[in-house]
Image (tube, rainbow, N blue to C red):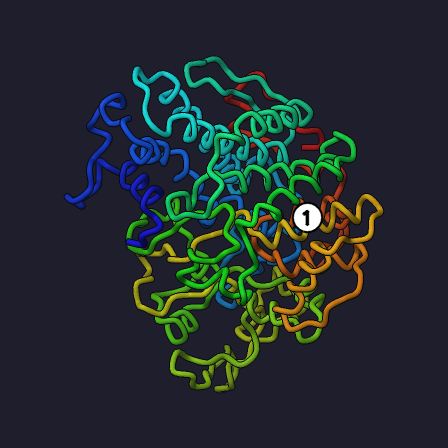
Amino acid sequence: MKKIYRYILSALAFGMAVSCTNLDEDIYSYISQDNFFTSEEQVAIYAGRAYTSLQNWGSEQSWLTMDMLLGDEACAPINPELKWDDNGRYKELQEHRIPTSSKLNLMTWDFIFDGIAACNDVIHALENSKFEFDGRARVLSEIKVLRAFFYYLAADGYDNVPFCIDKMDTSYPKPKNREFLYTFIESEVKENIDNLGDSRDTQYYGRITKGVANTLLAKLYLNAKVWGMGEQWAKAEEAAKAVIESGTYSLAENYKDNFIVHNETSPEAILAIPYSTQYIESSDNAFCLFALTLSTSIAKQKYNIGEGWYGYVGQPDFIATYEEGDTRLTDTYLFGQMYDKNGEKMTITPKGSGEVDYIIDPIFDESKFTEGRSELEGAFIHKWEYQTDGLLTSYKISMENDIFVFRYADVILMYAEAQLRQGKSLDKDALDGLNKLRERASLEPKPSFTLEELYLERGHEMALEGWRRQDMIRFGTYQDPWWAKPNRTPDYALLLPIPSEIKNANPHLVQNPGY
């Protein structure tokens, strides 16, 4: 086990204790809360039931994949095997025509509110324990900020959502709008930030720290205008600056260092979700991007992986926006000549054709979205390095790479954007930060940036990391027609629909207008 997973993966063992076969682990579910709340480590292990709810972020049907397919970075056209139609549910995402019955939308909703419920459970236990113990205030504050993060996602996606912060309240929760949730999130973070840790010590890897809290505030303030809360650019700048001036984080020397198999030592990790090929077996909380995107031939011959499901590919319009020479393009998408794990050129025999070199074209016609692309069309996603150790199979599908929900490069970009939104010239920290991002991508530095240039920079640096939909809405591009999306997105579709089975189960909920 990775040493830095000391708390989070121990928490995973706690959460799955009934099926645990590792006799070296303490089974905390069989010990009363009061008997094992005696140290910060034990408190953190109990609190891990809230943290492990984050692991669904990178699963097949959750926040990350929903964001990829709603934005312009990736798509799921019918593949050469004529699969991935799924009764048109991926085309619905592509065209922003999401029905209230969408399973993909329901899974995204469940990810958020399962996380909130887990936080409420842990907070209740910590607040009602009979004994004082080391680390109580810190861990309690961590989980309150984590709950605020989940409510941030809820408000951003749906606006009017059921609100409950008391585990013992069994009534139907009433909905609260973005104005209420904005105030709640801001106050919850500010009231708890002083209790949080402020280091990158392995003890706090994957946990809520001051850096996480300030990054969440920066995102809240940056999107305040979209939420109807007025322009809060100065506050966004201040929150991002607090992260930068903490000296806790720095840019990795190489862009790809943030996404390699063992990426836990990256200096950019602000909020990391730990994953493990060995310790995570359920597909519900596995990070399984390799399966979602790779063909079986690429999976087996290039990466020594059991199989691929041949689904997600890079969206051609987005791929075309990269500057010539930007290494982030080929660090993010796999196209061109395919090579096997020994470095030998791969060949393929497409349907109705003879054997040819396996050369993937990332740009293909949008009609192929529903007709089915060929074996030589559509760039695979490989932003996160795929391991070649043979541990990824058809049945063990969680990758080893951790996901950085908050990454230091994001803070630099937000800091610069907040200044530009105020009509300021970029200060030295912002300009130097942006140019360091460009230089490590093998691009020339710029003497200044416009908002339009920063938007492109943000898109290429943060591609596929779960924030594109939000960014496009803020920059006014989400409603535009794009590849295989011929019509402008209507205003109502800036919000996602409340899933029908959720709405039907709670008499207080009202569907978002337009759905």
Say which of 335 and 498 sits in front.
335
How many marks the image carries: the answer is 1
Residue 442 visible in the displayed image: yes
Say if 120 sits above or below 62 in the image: above
Identity of the residue furthest to the right in this view: 423
Residue that appears at 45% across and 30% down: 143
- Whether residue 87 is visible: no
Whole-percent x, y for residue 175 in the image: 60, 20
Q: Position of residue 256 (x, y in %)?
A: 52, 66
Residue drawn at the location 48% of the way across and 37% of the way down: 111
Residue 82 locus on image (x, y percent): 51, 63
Residue shown at the point (37%, 48%) measured from the top left:
283
User: Hey, which quadrant is residue 100 in on the image?
Assistant: top right
Q: Is residue 361 left or right of residue 235?
A: left
Q: Classify 10 Å Cα crowding around label 1: few (below 14), some (14-19), many (20 and above).
A: many
Task: Give the structural element (helix, strand or loop) at label 1.
Answer: helix
Q: Who's the residue at 65% across and 28% down the image?
A: 182
Q: What residue is disc 1 on?
A: 414
In the figure, is residue 138 to the left or right of 252?
left
Q: Amino acid at mark 1?
A: Met
Residue situated in front as seen by the camera: 195 or 295: 195
Q: Position of residue 340 (x, y in %)?
A: 42, 79
